[in-house]
Image (spheres, grey):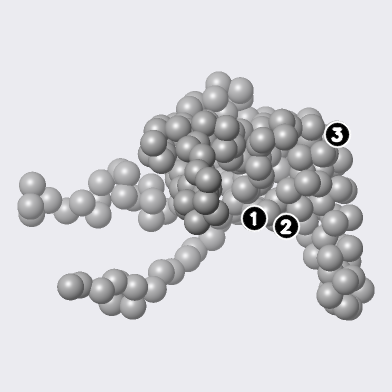
Amino acid sequence: MENQDLSASPLIQAMITRRSLRRYEKRTVARHILETIIQAATWAPSAHNRQPWRFAVIETDAEKVKLALAMGKRLRHDLEADNVPEAVIEKDVNRSYDRITSAPVLILLCLSMEDMDTYPDEKRSHNEYIMAVQSTAMAGQNLLLAAHEAGLGACWMCAPLFCPDVVQSSLCIPDDWQPQGLITLGYPAQSREKTRKPLQDVILWK
């Protein structure tokens, strides 16, 4: 086992070959495939095994447009407050709208603190929240890898972090569901190549 070439394993190859893809074919993703990749997401490790992740699946065009318009309105407001040039604002808002509305499926990844531990002090409460964030992020990685294995492309958008109230209101999700990321999903209509920093730049042996 010590001499085994792990780099050739299907799991590690899936990790290496997965890419963030933003353009998709106009094909429906079957419900059983979506359920399978979300089920895979729920097998991520979590703090205290509390499984704080929640998933809102958006498939209808009307809901995508409503969400995209609401998020775009907030994005425009924030950029205007930053005195960003109008041409740049228009480009950013249009790009966001296109990414959200052109994806066959959106999966809003949220966390809930409902089952997490509670503490009387701010420091431990904050740490508990971070533990929930980490757990939810690991579920998101499981979802991305499962989608890749299913032949799907996907991309994690962090935009909901900048307007969680807008996302909650637009999608009418429960109050305790805190948006963490919006994953666009579909059969890929593009391919991408990426590189990574060499190990010596990111690892310290002690």
Q: Which mark is first along the chain, 3 or 2?
A: 3
Give the residue number, with chain letter if any, for mark 1.
158
Mark 2 and mark 3: span between their CA atoms?
22 Å
- Please identify, in this view, whether the residue under mark 1 or under mark 3 is nearer the observer: 1
The residue drawn where x is 71% and y is 31% is: 174
Would you call the spot at circle 3 few (<14 residues within 10 Å), some (14-19), or many (20 or more)? Answer: few
Q: Report if the CB atoms under discs 1 and 2 are less than 8 Å apart.
A: yes
**Residue at 58% in and 46% down:** 154
Give the image location of residue 116, x and y in percent.
Answer: 50, 36
Query: In which quadrant is the C terminus drawn?
Result: bottom left
Residue type, label 2: Phe
Q: Nearer the viewer, residue 136 or 95?
A: 136
Q: Position of residue 38 (x, y in %)?
A: 52, 31
Q: Residue at x 76, y 40 (%)?
A: 168
Label 1: element kind: loop
Q: Secondary structure at mark 2?
A: helix
Nearer-the-camera pick, 99 or 162: 162
Camera-nearest label, 2 or 3: 2
- Residue at mark 3: 62
Of residue 134 and residue 113, the one placed in the foreground of this image is 113
In three-dimensional space, the C-alpha distance between marks 1 and 2, rounded to whole angstroms, equals 8 Å
Outermost residue, top direction? 32
In this picture, residue 40 sits left or right of residue 186 = left
Position above or below: 171 against 138? above
Instruction: Work out whether 135 lies above or below 201.
Output: above
Instruction: Measure the C-alpha gap from mark 1 to mark 3.
Output: 22 Å
Q: Position of residue 66 (x, y in %)?
A: 86, 40
Q: Would residue 123 be found to the left or right of residue 11 on screen?
A: right
- Select label 1 or label 2 by which is in front: 2
Determine which residue is flagged by label 2.
162
Q: Count residues near mark 1 (Cα–Cα under 10 Å), then give few for <14, some for 14-19, many for 20+.
A: few
Q: Amino acid at mark 3?
A: Ala
